[in-house]
Structures are given as C-alpha cells and as structure tokens.
Amino acid sequence: MPQRAPFDQPSEVYRRLIASGYEPMQVCTDNEAFRAWMERRFDESIVIPDDLAGVELIGWHYKRVLTPRTGVLLAKVDGEEVIVLVERRSSARRLGDQDGLHVYRRDLGGVAMYEVSPLHEARLLPHARRVGG
C-alpha cells in the first residue's frame, strides 16, 4: 500500500523544481562527482552512469520529502525532466504514482532511490550501480 511522504510529496517537489527553473544546488554531471556526492551524503559509492543514451545528469538539490534533507538528483531523459529522490533505506516508504507522474523504486546498498518521471518506465534506476571507492 503506497504511503504519503512525511514532508512534500514527490509530485509537488517535481513540479516546484520545474517551475523554479530546474536549477541544481550542486552541479554533478560525471561519474566521479556523482560517486563522491553519494559517498559523502549516504556512505555509499553509487553511480548512475554519465554516458547513458538520451540522459543528461544536471545536479543535486535537497528537499523535505522523506527526511528534512532528501537528496534530489535532477536529470533529463530524452528531453523530459526526471528526478531521483535518494534517502537511507531506514527512511524508505512505498510511494505510488501520483498526479500523472510515475514513481519507481530501487534499493541499492543502504539507500532507497525513487525515480519520479512522466515516462512509462524507469530509465535511470535500472543503471544505478555500486562502484569501488
């Protein structure tokens, strides 16, 4: 059974980021920067490869979604805005589709990742992987 996020709902975060210009707080566009950010924030060496066809990694933002500082990856997939919410698995929720957006979940190591997208399939999470630090 899907649950509500304790703070802002994923669809609200998605729409606010787009309305405000879709600007990251921290630019992160390559594997090493991505891995370093994940390791620093979540103690996990995880990447979503920076060379996926049709994918542009933009950077990170922080929002109150699952905890006061949920990591929010901004990306574009085939020109469509897509976000990935990242949080420790201990804060994980079962979030369902909402407001015309799909929410896909993947657990990897100690984190839960949610791809929030208008697309009918997850395009980032299937490629997320742990790497050597």
Image: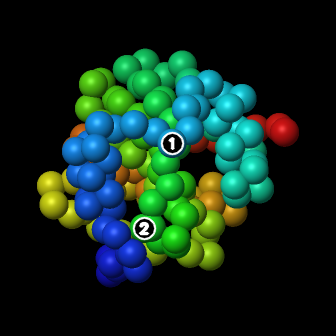
Image side of residue 55 versus residue 43, left or right: left
Quarter of the N terminus within the rendering: bottom left
Q: Position of residue 93 (x, y in %)?
A: 45, 74
The residue wearing badge 2 is: 65
**Can the viewer see residue 29 in this picture?**
yes
What mark, if any, has residue 25 been given in the picture?
Answer: 1
Dot 1 lies on which element?
loop
- The one of 38 and 104 positioned closer to us in this rendering: 38
**Can the viewer see residue 127 in this picture?**
no
| Furthest residue in direction right, as rendered | 133
32 in relation to 37, above or below: above
Alpha carbon of mark 2 to alpha carbon of mark 1: how far? 16 Å
* Whether label 2 touches label 1, CB < 8 Å: no
Given the image, on which type of amino acid does mark 1 rest?
Met
Given the image, on which type of amino acid does mark 2 rest?
Val
Image side of residue 89 versus residue 85, left or right: right
What mark, if any, has residue 102 been given in the picture?
Answer: none
Q: Position of residue 65 (x, y in %)?
A: 42, 67
Quarter of the C terminus within the rendering: top right
> Which residue corresponds to the image point at 43% horizontal and 24% vertical from the top-left?
56
> Which residue corresponds to the image point at 62% horizontal and 61% vertical from the top-left?
111
- Which mark's residue is nearer the viewer, 2 or 1? 1
